[in-house]
């Protein structure tokens, strides 16, 4: 039986951040994730490293947390962040009503803001709405949530944390006390002094297993990906937070979002046509060209919101709860928060755990740089174009220029187990064809050199494509036709469903 | 500039070219207008008529079709009738001059580009033995070309092994910028391929299994030369699009059309179709207008640009009737694809045949 000091449930950035933090402090840690790393809320994020400006008016605590973490992450994880800067732009007269409270709020929360002239704004972002009235620069940036998760994973593992993906667990409760976790598939038990519930939007469900009531409301947010990088700056609408008011550049794409709807369960969230159209309609006000370009993907994630009235009103701050205070020993929950504040959430959680374990080890995650992920991102691949001749023969995903060796690294070094895992680690399939042209090539490579059996790879290919097709139901136009075509290719020509 | 013509076919896919050929062979002037090559090469080149029905693989196509047409009266197969479907297909096979094999009212099995097995009606003759049954118990070399995509050689090898076939996978380092380029270079000098295989002693194996790259236009000749040089039997597997077999199919239909005197104008987009008193009276492209006696629209299911024809009632997606109420010289050749029932080019050939025959009848009756 495995015995650790701390068992963490949840392999999103928060769980991985806690694993990294505790492992650095010398605590023995095992992390259990029911799917893949960053396959829940983390991997469905906007990829926006907040400056805090978005929350400056209504949620000053969040705003100053974001502002501080923004600076720390740019220092410790420069290789997973593109320091794009952000802009808040007013495009309608009514936007100006928000201007004063916005500036006051930023000042109060320590969020840096700088006014931009119209000329400067257009020089920087020529596709901005020509009716632009006012623009401010903030310290927003683009962060790759997958690579952020992987960097934390690598550092945690380098410090001897054990990380298990595709390993759902349940709390092991003895006389009201949480004593570890039980692996659902094998029935195996893992003993732990403390179990950390880092499952975000799923936190309420995990608490229930120990008889603890925790109100976390899953809040659905939908995002839309356009295949052309129209902006190099994060664009925000200068108005109170609402649907479709942010555009984030991400590698060769832009991601538009988002929406906010409370949902019963954080599982299996799919974007709707209505949400996609709403986002495009609002996005168009920031950049009119977005309506004329191809939407290659839409996806939905679940925010773990804590309290408050509507989804937009609810605070983006986080909570670290020691359930001992309500009589359940051995269980700590961390939930709420933002991708931007994941490190701070991990720090606070690890601080509490160290106190409970009687350890005096300071947090170092704000100073020590995260390790590099041994796979290039697409911008780096573009930079090396032409320098490495002959590489095209080894290119498996042509849209994102992912090579054979990168896919092998995903499996051998970064613990990929499925095609979806490869996608999250390499960007395979995140481009215009949405993996339709390369999925079978990756599957073939898995059968060739990665030890997978033919039937196993075909099952995985089928599951992966079904997931891709499911998400594309809300799309229209040429992307929809393209997906129909490839469905026919796989099913009629490839006999995949037999 | 306006010119008169007996028939215009819009679209150069399998259905459009089939219709054009039939009208041309009937002695009328035909002009095919298409924006591109058509979607033949976007298929894997096998002729899928009805591969699955009621959850089972179809073997006896004739009896499955009989049931199918009763239950799907809207379908092109029902509109054509079982007999016409089968005769359109045997005519297609006959005129392919040996490119296609199989048929005879029965499906056969073929190994797909993913190594699964599906039922299909006609395959290119180089693929006649590309089934687990034909290869069972034998020793084969399976060829992979680094850089050539369109099939999954290692999955195929794994599936073959589980069927009791002894497989050796051999990588052949031939430049494969595209499958078409590879096929045409093998066609012009097959020894480049067979020399590379010399060390493998192919004659000690029962079969050498290739992706479909043994020639583009002279497939049978290329195939035979490769068999002679390797001193063993050679078989091709189908591949994903863009596929060489699909391109071969296009070349075959195109040359049949040219023999029938059909003129083919690619790279043209129809901008307007004018109706007057229940007749199509003018078809315009950017470069000029035509006055056709009949018009066949065969714009496919995939990249179908919806032509707005003023005065024409909108057609639903499931409407495959070749005629439209109230316009006497307009015919549609749009065919349904079904991945459930594995219906592909079989429907395209049937639709083209049906629309072509109907237009021909109309022209013969002196409709102008």
Image (tube, coloured by chain):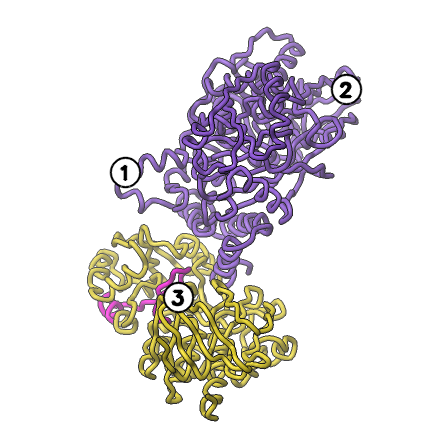
Chain colours: A purple, B yellow
Image quadrant where one finds the N terminus of chain B: bottom left
Question: Which mark is nearer the camera, 2 or 1?
Answer: 1
Q: Which mark is residue A388?
A: 1
Q: In this rendering, does residue A343 appear at all? A: yes
x and y percent of residue B215 in the render? 28, 67
Between A248 and A344, the one nearer to me in the picture: A248
Asked if labels 2 and 1 share a chain, the reply is yes
Label 2: element kind: loop
Question: Would residue B72 be counted in the magenta stretch?
Answer: no
Question: Which residue range is magenta in the image?
Answer: B225-250
Left or right: residue A142 versus residue A311 is left
**What number is the disc on residue B314?**
none
Question: How crowded is the residue under tag 1: few (<14 C-alpha within 10 Å), some, or many (20+)?
Answer: few
- Residue A325 versus residue B362 in the image, above or below: above
Query: Mark on residue A328?
Result: 2
Crowding around mark 3 (Cα neighbors within 10 Å: few <14, some 14 to 19, many 20+) is some
Residue placed farthest to the top in the image?
A: A360
Q: Taking the image as drawn, is residue A166 in sight?
A: no
Disc 3: which residue: B35
Mark 2, Cα crowd under 10 Å, few <14 / some 14-19 / many 20+, is some
Label 3: which secondary element: loop
């Amino acid at each position: 039986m495995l015995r650790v000091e701390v068992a963490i449930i949840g392999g999103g950035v928060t769980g991985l951040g806690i694993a990294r933090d505790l492992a650095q402090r010398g605590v023995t840690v095992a992390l259990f994730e029911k799917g893949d790393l960053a396959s829940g809320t983390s991997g469905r994020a906007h990829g926006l490293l907040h400056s805090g400006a978005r929350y400056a008016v209504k949620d000053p605590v969040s705003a100053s947390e974001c502002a501080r973490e923004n600076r720390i992450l740019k220092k410790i994880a420069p290789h997973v962040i593109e320091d794009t800067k952000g802009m808040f732009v007013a495009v309608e007269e009514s936007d100006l009503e928000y201007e004063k409270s916005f500036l006051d709020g930023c000042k109060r929360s320590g969020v840096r803001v700088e006014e931009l002239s119209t000329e400067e704004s257009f020089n920087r972002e020529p596709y901005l709405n020509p009716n632009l009235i006012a623009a401010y620069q903030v310290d927003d940036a683009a962060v790759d949530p997958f690579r952020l998760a992987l960097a934390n994973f690598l550092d945690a593992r380098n410090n001897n944390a054990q990380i298990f993906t595709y390993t759902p667990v349940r709390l092991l409760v003895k006389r009201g006390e949480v004593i570890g976790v039980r692996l659902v598939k094998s029935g195996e038990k893992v003993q732990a002094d403390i179990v950390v519930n880092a499952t975000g939007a799923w936190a309420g469900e995990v608490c229930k297993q120990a008889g603890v009531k925790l109100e976390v409301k899953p809040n659905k947010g939908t995002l839309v990906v356009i295949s052309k990088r129209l902006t190099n700056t994060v664009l925000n609408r200068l108005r109170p937070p609402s649907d479709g008011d942010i555009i984030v550049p991400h590698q060769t794409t832009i991601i538009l979002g988002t929406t906010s709807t409370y949902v019963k369960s954080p599982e299996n969230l799919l974007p709707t046509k209505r949400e996609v159209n709403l986002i495009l309609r609002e996005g168009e006000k920031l950049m009119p060209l977005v309506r004329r370009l191809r939407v290659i993907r839409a996806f939905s994630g679940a925010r773990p919101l804590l309290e408050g009235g509507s989804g937009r009103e609810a605070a983006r701050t986080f909570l670290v709860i020691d359930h001992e205070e309500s009589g359940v020993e051995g269980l700590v929950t961390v939930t709420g928060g933002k991708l931007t504040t994941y490190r701070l959430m991990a720090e606070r959680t690890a601080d509490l755990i160290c106190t409970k374990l009687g350890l005096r080890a300071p947090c170092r995650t704000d100073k020590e740089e995260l390790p590099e992920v041994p796979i290039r991102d697409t911008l780096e691949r573009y930079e090396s174009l032409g320098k490495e001749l002959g590489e095209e023969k080894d290119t498996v995903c042509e849209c994102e220029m992912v090579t054979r060796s990168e896919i092998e690294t995903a499996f051998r070094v970064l613990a990929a187990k499925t095609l979806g895992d490869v996608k999250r680690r390499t960007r395979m399939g995140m481009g215009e064809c949405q993996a339709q042209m390369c999925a079978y090539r990756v599957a073939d490579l898995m059968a060739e050199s990665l030890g997978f059996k033919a039937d196993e790879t075909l099952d995985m290919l089928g599951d992966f494509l079904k997931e891709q097709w499911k998400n594309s139901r809300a799309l229209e136009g040429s992307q929809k036709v393209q997906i129909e075509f490839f469905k026919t290719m796989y099913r009629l020509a490839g006999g995949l469903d037999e | 500039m306006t010119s008169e013509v007996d028939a215009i076919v819009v679209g150069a896919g399998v259905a459009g070219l089939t219709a054009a050929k039939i009208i041309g062979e009937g002695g009328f002037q035909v002009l095919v207008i298409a924006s591109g090559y058509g979607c033949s090469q976007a298929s894997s080149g096998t002729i899928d008529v009805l591969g699955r029905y009621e959850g089972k693989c179809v073997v006896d196509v004739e009896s499955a079709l009989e049931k199918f047409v009763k239950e799907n009266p809207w379908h092109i197969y029902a509109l054509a009738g079982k007999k016409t479907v089968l005769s359109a297909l045997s005519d297609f096979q006959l005129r392919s001059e040996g490119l296609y094999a199989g048929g005879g009212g029965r499906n056969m099995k073929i190994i797909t580009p993913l190594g699964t097995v599906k039922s299909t009606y006609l395959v290119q003759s180089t693929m006649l033995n590309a089934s687990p049954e034909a290869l069972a118990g034998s020793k084969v070399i399976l060829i992979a070309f680094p850089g050539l995509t369109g099939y999954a050689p290692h999955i195929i090898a794994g599936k073959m092994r589980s069927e009791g076939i002894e497989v050796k996978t051999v990588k052949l380092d031939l430049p494969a910028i595209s499958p078409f380029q590879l096929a045409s270079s093998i066609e012009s000098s097959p020894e480049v391929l067979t020399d590379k295989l010399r060390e493998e002693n192919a004659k000690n194996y029962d079969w050498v299994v290739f992706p479909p790259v043994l020639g583009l236009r002279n497939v049978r000749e290329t195939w035979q030369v490769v068999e002679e040089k390797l001193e063993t039997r050679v078989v091709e597997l189908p591949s994903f699009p863009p596929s060489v077999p699909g391109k071969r199919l296009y070349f075959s239909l195109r040359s049949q059309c040219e023999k029938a005197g059909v003129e083919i104008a690619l790279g043209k987009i129809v901008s307007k179709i004018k109706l007057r008193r229940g007749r199509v009276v003018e078809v315009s492209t950017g470069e000029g207008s035509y006055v056709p006696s009949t018009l066949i629209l065969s714009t496919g299911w995939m990249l179908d640009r919806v032509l707005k024809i003023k005065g024409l009632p909108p057609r639903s997606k499931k409407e495959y009737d070749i005629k439209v109420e109230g316009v006497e010289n307009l015919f549609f050749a749009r065919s349904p694809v079904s991945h459930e029932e594995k219906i592909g080019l079989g429907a395209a050939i049937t639709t083209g045949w049906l629309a072509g025959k109907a237009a021909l009848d109309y022209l013969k009756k002196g409709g102008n």
